[in-house]
Image: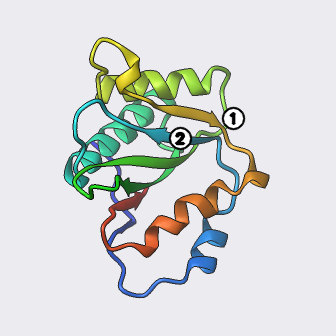
Amino acid sequence: MAQKTLYSRPLNLYDFETTAKWLEGEWSAFCTFTYHRRMTLKSARRKMEALQEYLVNLYGPEIRMFWVTEPFRDNNSCHVHALIKIPGSPEGLETSILTAWHKVAPPAGYKKHSLTSISQYEPGRGGHYYVAKYLQSDKVDWDIF
C-alpha cells in the first residue's frame, strides 16, 4: 500500500521560487515517464502510486518521490516528471527505476512507445526548477511521498 500523500494538486496560490527552492535538495534521479497508451491525469496518478509502492518494497520506506504531470499539447494526455531520492543511491539505480516503471506501466513489447528517461540527478542542471514550473498550471496533477 502506498504511503500517505503529503500534498496533492491543485493549489490556488503558488509561489514558483519558494516551491523550486523547497524542491532543491539531494535527489538520486531525475525521471521522465511516458506510456505507449494515452495517459490521463487519473491513470498517471495510479501508475505513480504503484511505482512508489514498488520502490518502497524494493528499497524501504525511506525513499522520497516528487512527481508532476506535464500535459501534451492536446491536453488529453500527459507524461510524468519525477525526482526520486533513494538513500545510499545504490548501484544500478537508473536500471532498477526503469524496471519498476515497466512493472507498473508495461511497454508494448517494444520500448520506442515508452520513451522513459532516467538519469542521475545533477543539482546544477536545475531539475527542481523544471518540475516546479508545471505546478503553475491547473491542468496537472502532482504529489510528494
How would you rate the neighbour count of disc 2 (Cα within 10 Å): few for under 14, some for 14-19, many for 20 or more? many
Q: Secondary structure at mark 1?
A: loop
Label 1: few (<14), some (14–19) or many (≥20) C-alpha neighbours in 10 Å: few
Q: Tell me which amino acid carries mark 2.
A: Cys
Q: Which residue is painted at 44% across and 33% down in the image?
A: 55
Image point 52% across, 23% down: which residue? 96
Hey, which residue is sitting farthest front in the picture?
A: 73
Indicate whether 89 appears above or below 16: above
Proximity of marks 1 and 2: CB atoms separated by less than 8 Å: no
Q: Is residue 130 left or right of residue 57?
A: right
Q: Return the residue at label 2.
A: 31
What residue do we see at 56% from left, 33% from top? Answer: 118
Residue type at tag 1: Gly
Instruction: Note whether 127 is above or below 12 in the view shown.
Output: above
Percent x, y of residue 139: 30, 67
Q: Quadrant of residue 106?
A: top left
Label annotation for residue 88: 1
Q: CA distance from mark 1 to mark 2?
A: 18 Å
